[in-house]
Each structure stands twice: as structure tokens, then as C-alpha cells.
């Protein structure tokens, strides 16, 4: 006989969204540390009683699918198969890996799945009504977008690590999830194992975030570390990163700054509620850096890092991703190898720091499984609708690029002859750029009266990108200056 609902005196419970709730917010309550869903909860005005149906605290397993069993998917499967009891305890219910999808069934996999779980059939996952949560770990934008939309439309909550997809289609995907009453969890999409999405989205919710400064691409940081430590060229350090598995065979998105910029877009949306696209802010990678610049920077007391920054300046949002000089004693300068680090300043908490492995199979799986636990336990259902992300009315406008102000490191190759330095100083001065320091090492006498080329390094005081651009137009017209012309901002502090 079916068990009748019990009327239980609730010693400790919390009602959520009982009156005036937006349609996407479900009713839920916490009772005895368990989340009760809408169907399990009946409100008795003023009494403080919960009606708890027989299966409301069900320990029925949750059926899960992994779409994309590559590096991260394999790590997720490993955790689920290795730690089922720990995960079940924390999710409130056992998790069953019911399906896993790949493109190529013949590829060797590093994890052994139960028979019948692995297939190439995404449609079977989409059509499977038993699958309640899909872990979406297909990279790129197409067909990842269509797959995620179909998973949401078929009634599944989604966990993903795909920052490229969220950066390009997040607006559409989040709107679809909200419309369908589903959730998207994406902790692993930024900084791998570092729980920065939960930190910015929830833990610092009392604050107006004032700035985010971060090393968000482990491949670039590994290459810069190797160049500085080993005196290697960029090409040597890249080859080393590839042989050690820190860089893909095609590392373009890592080393040209795109990957860091995509992650910065997600963090910025969470922190400030704005909707920047990659085209809205300056982005440069490390692929044109020369060892000489790392050495001059070191001589001046700085390290070079690929820094992603978004900060409020006079009520506007300044964003950029570029190789940047940081004081050698600055905390971000001491982040070496493939690690990531993020400094977040809030108006109430002040400056906070987070660092750790920003990618890799198990660190990323750690974040994905945490999202899975949150989704199954009901936490994501409460936090997702409240995320300050892809809002309709962004509260801040973007600062125009030419207004971004900074100190700058400049390097020119100049002919070693009289007046060159004076000409450069004159052009900089007329564009309201004042020189803080200059390095010009003595060049050997060129044979036969030829003009030797010598590197000239200039550190400026604070100026705007607009002033620097107009000075550079004039400088490039000087016949005594030969390429390359190197320019990097210098972080404050
Ligand atoms: N790797 C990391 O350290 C890391 C860190 C943070 C975030 N992420 C993000 O996590 C996501 C997954 O990364 P990953 O490194 O695990 O990628 P990956 O190793 O390339 O794995 C992708 C998986 O998706 C499968 N797949 C691709 N297209 C498919 C399709 N159309 N239908 C079904 N399956 C398909 C592939 O199948 P086959 O195996 O048969 O090719 C593979 O199993 C990406 O968005 C990435 O940016 C990765």
C-alpha cells in the first residue's frame, strides 16, 4: 500500500520563493539537511509544518550521462566510479552513469565503463527520459551549441566546462534554460579546479566587485615561466609545453589570448552583470613575445605575465587581456608553470586571492563533479536564476579602448646616431607621455661606418592608450626606428 504523506513538525527549515516567485524559481525547502522539491512541500500558513511525501527524501539513484568522454569526461567518469559513496552522500542520492557519448568508439579510453554505457549516439541521450542530468563536455561551439539546446529541451539539467560555447552563445543558452526551467552549471569553464565561479557568483555576493586581475591560461603561463627560467625563445618553450602535454598540437587559442579572454568574459558577466563580447576589448597573446623583453623587464624589476583584467574605473568597465609587466614581488608574478591565479577586489571584503591548477583532467573533473552534486542536491536550482549573468539591463558601460590608462613598457630598435633619443622623447612629450626611465645598452662600433641598431627600452609614466597610439603613429614614421616596436602595459602596484 502506498505510504500516506506525513505531516512533520519542522525543527529547522527554510522556505524559498513561496510568494511572488518568478516562474523559473521552484518551491523548495530544507528539512533535516535535505532539499525537498516542490512536489514534496505543502505550505501551511503560519504553522511551520511540512507535508513530506513518502518518497520525498528519496535515495533513488539519479541517472546521468556524459556527452564527450575525452580528457575531462574521462576524469569525471573516474571520480564517479571511484568514489560513488562519497558522491552519493554529498549529492543526497546515488549517481548512476547511465550513458556516455564519444565520436569514435574505437579510440582507446583510460577508464573502463560498465557494459553498454559508451556509444556514439547523442540522440539516444537526448531521447532518454531517465537521464536527468547531462554532463556536456564536447568542446568548441558547433555542434556543442545544438547538443546543449537539445539536452535542455529534453528536460535535462546541464553541467559544462565549455567556456568557448558559453562565451559565444551563453545569452541564448541561459535564456533557453530559464525558459525551460532547467539549470546550467559551469564552474569548470573558468580556471579548472579553482572554484572561482561559485566565489564570484555566490560567496562574494555582498560585494560590488571592483576588479578582477587574473592569470587564466596555464599554457601561456607555462611558456612564459620556461622562457624566463631557462632563457628559452618562445618557440623553444612552446615545443617543451607541447611535449609535456601543457599545449595542444594546435595551441592557437591558448597563446593568442582567446582562451583567457573567453574566461574573462564569463567572470566579468558574473561580477558586473554586463555582456561584453570578445570584440569589445583589447586582446593580445604571448605569441609575439621575445626573450629580450622578458630580460629587460627583469632588469627593471618586473615579470611578464599574460594578464586578464576587468575593473571598474570611474563607473565604466575596463577590460583587456595582454602580456603585462608585474612587479616581481607582486603575488601574481609568483604564479609559475601551468597554474592559474585570480585576484578579486570587492568593496566590502577588500582584496582576495585564489590560485591552483587551472586545467587538466582531474582538477577540471573536480569542478564538474562538484557542479553535478550541486545540481542533484538542488543547490543549482536555487542559485542559477539569481546569477548576475546575461542581464537584460547591464549596469555598466564599457570604457572606450583609447581611454584605458596605464604605464607602458616600450622597446624600439633604433639606429645608433645623434638626436634619435631626443626625437623620440619629443614625440612622446607632445602626446602627453612622460618618460620614467630608459635603458640603452652600449652597442659595439659597426664596421665600415654602418649604423648599428640598438634596442631602446622606455618605461613611461601613466598615460592613455589613445595618447600612446597617436605617439606610435608619429614614431613609426621616424626612419631611425626599425621594427619590432614592442609595447606592454605595466600593472599598477
Ligand atoms: N582539458 C582541460 O584541461 C579542460 C579544462 C577546462 C575546461 N575544458 C573544456 O572542457 C571541454 C572538454 O574538453 P576536453 O579536453 O575533455 O576535450 P577532448 O579531450 O577533446 O574531449 C571531447 C570529447 O567530446 C567528444 N565529441 C566531440 N564531438 C562530439 C560529437 N559531435 N558528439 C559526441 N561526442 C563528441 C570526443 O569524442 P572522441 O573522444 O571520440 O573524439 C571527446 O570524447 C572543452 O569545452 C574544454 O574547453 C577542458
Image (cartoon, rainbow, N blue to C red):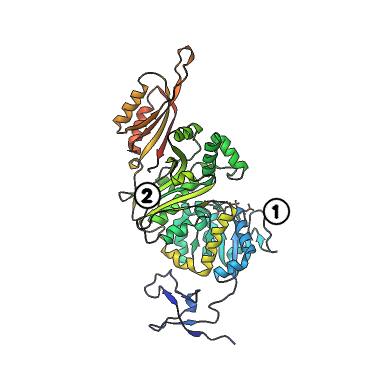
Assign a secondary structure to mark 2: strand
Left/right placement of residue 309 relative to residue 314 reads right
Q: Position of residue 83 (x, y in %)?
A: 62, 64
Q: Nearer the viewer, mark 1 or mark 2?
A: 2
Task: Determine if residue 348 is in view.
Answer: yes
- Pick out the residue farthest to the front: 329
In this view, 46 is above or below 187: below
Q: Quadrant of the N terminus?
A: bottom right
Q: Position of residue 484 (x, y in %)?
A: 45, 29
- Picture quadrant where residue 229 is located: top right
Residue at 57% x, 57% y is 365
Residue at 40% x, 39% y is 489
Q: CA distance from mark 1 to mark 2?
A: 48 Å
Query: What label does residue 228 carry, if any?
Result: none
In depth, the one of 357 and 129 nearer the eye is 357
In this view, 65 is above or below 45: above
Disc 1: residue Cβ within 8 A of ligand 1's nearest atom: no
Query: What label does residue 311 carry, if any?
Result: 2
Task: Determine if residue 122 is in view.
Answer: no
Assign a secondary structure to mark 1: loop
In this view, 45 is above or below 170: below
Q: Residues within 10 Å of mark 1 (few under 14, many from 20)?
A: few
Q: Determine contact: label 1, label 2, CB under 8 Å.
A: no
In depth, the one of 448 and 296 nearer the eye is 296
Q: Residues within 10 Å of mark 2 (few under 14, many from 20)?
A: many
In depth, the one of 295 and 418 nearer the eye is 295
- The residue where tag 1 is placed is 106
Residue at 45% x, 68% y is 382
Left/right placement of residue 38 relative to residue 315 reads right
User: Which circle's residue, 1 or 2, is located before the other in the chain?
Assistant: 1
Amino acid at each position: 500500500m502506498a505510504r500516506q504523506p506525513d505531516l512533520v513538525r519542522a525543527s529547522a527549515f527554510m522556505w524559498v520563493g513561496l510568494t511572488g516567485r518568478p516562474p523559473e524559481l521552484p518551491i523548495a525547502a530544507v528539512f533535516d539537511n535535505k532539499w525537498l522539491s516542490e512536489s514534496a512541500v505543502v505550505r501551511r500558513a503560519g504553522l511551520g509544518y511540512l507535508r513530506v511525501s513518502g518518497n520525498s527524501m528519496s535515495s533513488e539513484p539519479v541517472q546521468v550521462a556524459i556527452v564527450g568522454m575525452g580528457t575531462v569526461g574521462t576524469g569525471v567518469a573516474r571520480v564517479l566510479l571511484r568514489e560513488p559513496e562519497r558522491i552519493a552522500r554529498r549529492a543526497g542520492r546515488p549517481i548512476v552513469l547511465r550513458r556516455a557519448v564519444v565520436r569514435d568508439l574505437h579510440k582507446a579510453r583510460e577508464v573502463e565503463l560498465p557494459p553498454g554505457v559508451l556509444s556514439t549516439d547523442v540522440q539516444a541521450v537526448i531521447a532518454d527520459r531517465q537521464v536527468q542530468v547531462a554532463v556536456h563536455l564536447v568542446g568548441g561551439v558547433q555542434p556543442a551549441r545544438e547538443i546543449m539546446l537539445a539536452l535542455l529541451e529534453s528536460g535535462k539539467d546541464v553541467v559544462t566546462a565549455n567556456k568557448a560555447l558559453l562565451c559565444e552563445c551563453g545569452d541564448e543558452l541561459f535564456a533557453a534554460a530559464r525558459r525551460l526551467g532547467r539549470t546550467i552549471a559551469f564552474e569548470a569553464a573558468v580556471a579548472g579546479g579553482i572554484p572561482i565561479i561559485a566565489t564570484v557568483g555566490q560567496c562574494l555576493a555582498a560585494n560590488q566587485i571592483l576588479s578582477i586581475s587574473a592569470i587564466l591560461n596555464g599554457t601561456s603561463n607555462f611558456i612564459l615561466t620556461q622562457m624566463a627560467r631557462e632563457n628559452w625563445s618562445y618557440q623553444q618553450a612552446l615545443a617543451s609545453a607541447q611535449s609535456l602535454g601543457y599545449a595542444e598540437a594546435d595551441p592557437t587559442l591558448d597563446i593568442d589570448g582567446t582562451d583567457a579572454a573567453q574566461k574573462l568574459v564569463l567572470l566579468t558577466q558574473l561580477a558586473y552583470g554586463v555582456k561584453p563580447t570578445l570584440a569589445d576589448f583589447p586582446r593580445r597573446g604571448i605569441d609575439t613575445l621575445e626573450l629580450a623583453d622578458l630580460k629587460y623587464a627583469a632588469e627593471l624589476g618586473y615579470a611578464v605575465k599574460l594578464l586578464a583584467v576587468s575593473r571598474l574605473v570611474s563607473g565604466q568597465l575596463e577590460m583587456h587581456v595582454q602580456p603585462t609587466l608585474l612587479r616581481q614581488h607582486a603575488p601574481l608574478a609568483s604564479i609559475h608553470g601551468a597554474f592559474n591565479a585570480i585576484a578579486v577586489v570587492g568593496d566590502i571584503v577588500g582584496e582576495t586571492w585564489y590560485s591552483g591548477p587551472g586545467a587538466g583532467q582531474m582538477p577540471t573533473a573536480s569542478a564538474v563533479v562538484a557542479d553535478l552534486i550541486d545540481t542533484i542536491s538542488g543547490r543549482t536550482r536555487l542559485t542559477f536564476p539569481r546569477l548576475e549573468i546575461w542581464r537584460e539591463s547591464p549596469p555598466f558601460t564599457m570604457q572606450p579602448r583609447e581611454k584605458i590608462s596605464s604605464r607602458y613598457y616600450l622597446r624600439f630598435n633604433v639606429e645608433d646616431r645623434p638626436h634619435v633619443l631626443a626625437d623620440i622623447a619629443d614625440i612622446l612629450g607632445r602626446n602627453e607621455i612622460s618618460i620614467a626611465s630608459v635603458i640603452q645598452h652600449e652597442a659595439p662600433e659597426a664596421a665600415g661606418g654602418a649604423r648599428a641598431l640598438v634596442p631602446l627600452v622606455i618605461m613611461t609614466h601613466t598615460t592613455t592608450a589613445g595618447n600612446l597610439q597617436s605617439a606610435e603613429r608619429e614614431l613609426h614614421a621616424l626612419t631611425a626606428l626599425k621594427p619590432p616596436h614592442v609595447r606592454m602595459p605595466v600593472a599598477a602596484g
